[in-house]
Amino acid sequence: MKKILLLLTLLILVIGCSSVTNEVSDPNKIYRLSDFSEIGWKQKKPFVTDFPQSDKAFWGYFKGHEVGLILYPSSKLANEYGIPAANNQIEVIDGKKTINVERFVCRGNTGSIESPSCPNPMPMYSEYVVKNNVVILCEIVKSLMKGSKIKADSTSFCKDFAKNLEE
């Protein structure tokens, strides 16, 4: 009975923690990496994962937080292929990252110098937004405000990042 309750709790957590916001201001606008650099995103390295139908996929930083970008030739392809790709990057099953997650962070005890390990790998990204032809993946962001909820802050950060493109 405890296992069933635990599995149901985890299922609710996974479903409740995954979200998608589809931001289409001008559906014909095709964003490029340079558009993100212009708003302050600092490009670091490409993803190793091959995202089907994508043109490019890089991760970098914006205001001290990691942000991943998967660019597609059109908003239609971003919705069709990008949403499943983003869900794979934020997926957690039984409190562990899945094999599809490329970028992850270690939570909890990370072992020792002689025997480094990552007993609790979790996805780097917790939220994503689809903005026209781009899937924007955002890391877990916790506000400094007392009583803040991580999910709410991550969602706000991701949406605010996408809105910067319109200014």
Image: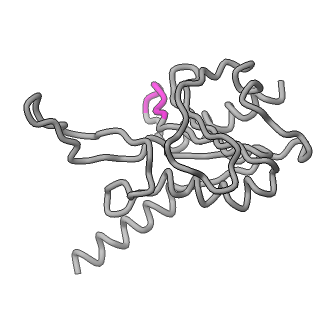
The residue lying toward the viewer, choosing from 147 and 121, is 121
Q: Residue furthest bottom?
A: 1
Count of labels in the image: 0
Task: Judge left or right: residue 52 versus residue 143.
Answer: right
Q: Is 4 rendered above or below residue 18?
A: below
Q: Residue drawn at (39%, 58%), measured in percent from left and top?
A: 98
Q: Residue at x 56, y 38 (%)?
A: 138
Quadrant housing residue 35:
top right
Residue at 77% over, 32% down: 32
What is the magenta segment's predominant secondary structure? loop
Q: Residue furthest left?
A: 114
Query: Who is closer to the viewer here, 60 or 157?
Result: 60
Work out whether 150 lies above or below 40: below
Residue at screen point 79% across, 47% down: 73
Q: Of residues 54 and 15, which is closer to you in this image?
A: 54
Indicate the position of residue 153 as horizontal and vertical percent values: 54, 36
Classify residue 4 as left or right of residue 130.
left
Indicate whether residue 103 is drawn in magenta: no
- Looking at the picture, how far across and down is residue 61, in whole percent? 55, 24
Quadrant of image for the N terminus: bottom left
| Quadrant the C terminus occupies | top right
Type of colouring: one colour
Question: Is the residue 131 above or below the residue 15 in the image?
Answer: above
Q: To which quarter of the image does residue 4 belong?
A: bottom left
Span highlighted in magenta in the image:
141-146
Q: Quadrant of residue 103?
A: top left
Q: Is residue 159 left or right of residue 108?
A: right
Percent position of residue 142, x then y: 46, 33
